[in-house]
Image (cartoon, helix red, strand yellow):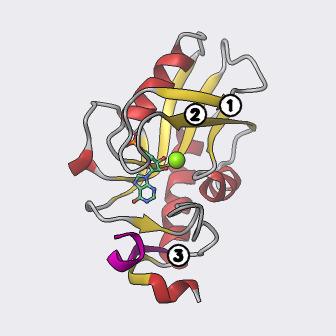
């Protein structure tokens, strides 16, 4: 079973539901009277995306991007390749990027630069998790579910080698699995 590979559960599905409800309230309040153009970063954000958009009480348009960083797989290099771009033009839209976790922040810094150049009315970032101790950029997370320590997490969209994304909780992966 997948849970056998988990050292410790960091967020249960109830914890996550609480985080989503809180984010949804904040976002709905801040965007009252506006429409949000939500940009989900595939694939990691897909589970979080589908929950958080349903916790938001203003109209949400949905679009997706796939970004892949060059270099080795464990550390991001900051050079990002767009494997799938948005289907729509974001000029004049209130863009909200929805991401699973911000680690070094290099991927997001690069993506935001690309999206800002397309002249949205505004652009904000919503991330379920943040690892502040790993940050290498000053990317601002406007809506953040929780800050986490420097541990390798899986579940709720987060993967190790494409596995564990469908785990309903978020846990620390046992070292022996990835060492
Ligand atoms: P950054 O450019 O270093 O901020 O990379 C962020 C990306 O790294 C996220 O979108 C995740 O795909 C991945 N990532 C960072 N930390 C973890 C983790 O603990 N578990 C799974 N994926 C992670
Ligand atoms: Mg990702």
Q: Which residue is mark 1?
A: 37
State the separation of the CA atoms marked 1 and 3.
27 Å
The local secondary structure at tag 2 comes to strand
**Membership of 175 in magenta stretch:** yes
**Membership of 108 in magenta stretch:** no
Q: Which residue is mark 3?
A: 169
Magenta extent? 170-179
Image quarter for residue 121? Answer: top right
Q: Is residue 105 above or below residue 167?
A: above
Nearer to us: label 3 or label 2: 3
**Comes first in the chain, label 3 or label 2:** 2
Q: Quadrant of the C terminus?
A: bottom left
State the separation of the CA atoms marked 3 and 2.
24 Å
The local secondary structure at tag 1 comes to strand
Q: Position of residue 19 (x, y in %)?
A: 48, 63
Q: Which residue is mark 2?
A: 96
Nearer to us: label 1 or label 3: 3
Q: Position of residue 59 (x, y in %)?
A: 75, 38
Q: Position of residue 15 (x, y in %)?
A: 47, 74
The reply to whether dot 1 and dot 2 touch (C-beta < 8 Å) is yes
Q: Is residue 51 above or below residue 109?
A: below
State the separation of the CA atoms marked 1 and 2.
6 Å
159 or 137, which lies in front?
159
Q: Is residue 1 above or below residue 37?
A: below
Q: Position of residue 173 (x, y in %)?
A: 40, 74
Q: Quadrant of the N terminus?
A: bottom right
| 10 Å crowding of disc 2: few (<14), some (14-19), many (20+) | many
**Comes first in the chain, label 1 or label 3:** 1
């Amino acid at each position: 079973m997948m849970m056998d590979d988990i050292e410790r559960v960091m967020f249960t599905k109830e914890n996550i539901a609480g985080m989503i409800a809180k984010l949804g309230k904040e976002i709905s309040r801040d965007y009252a009277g506006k429409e949000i153009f939500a940009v989900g970063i595939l694939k990691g954000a897909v589970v979080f995306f589908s929950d958080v958009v349903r916790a938001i009480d203003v109209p949400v348009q949905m679009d997706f991007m796939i970004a892949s960083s060059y270099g080795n797989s464990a550390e991001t290099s900051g050079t990002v390749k767009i494997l799938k771009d948005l289907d729509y033009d974001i000029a004049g839209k209130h863009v909200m990027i929805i991401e699973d976790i911000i680690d070094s922040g290099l991927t997001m810094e690069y993506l935001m630069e690309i999206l800002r150049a397309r002249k949205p009315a505004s652009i904000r970032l919503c991330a379920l998790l943040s690892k502040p101790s790993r940050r290498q950029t000053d990317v601002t997370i406007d809506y953040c579910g929780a800050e986490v320590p420097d541990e390798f997490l899986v579940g709720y969209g987060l993967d190790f080698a494409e596995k564990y994304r469908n785990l309903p909780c978020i846990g620390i992966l046992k070292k022996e699995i990835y060492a």
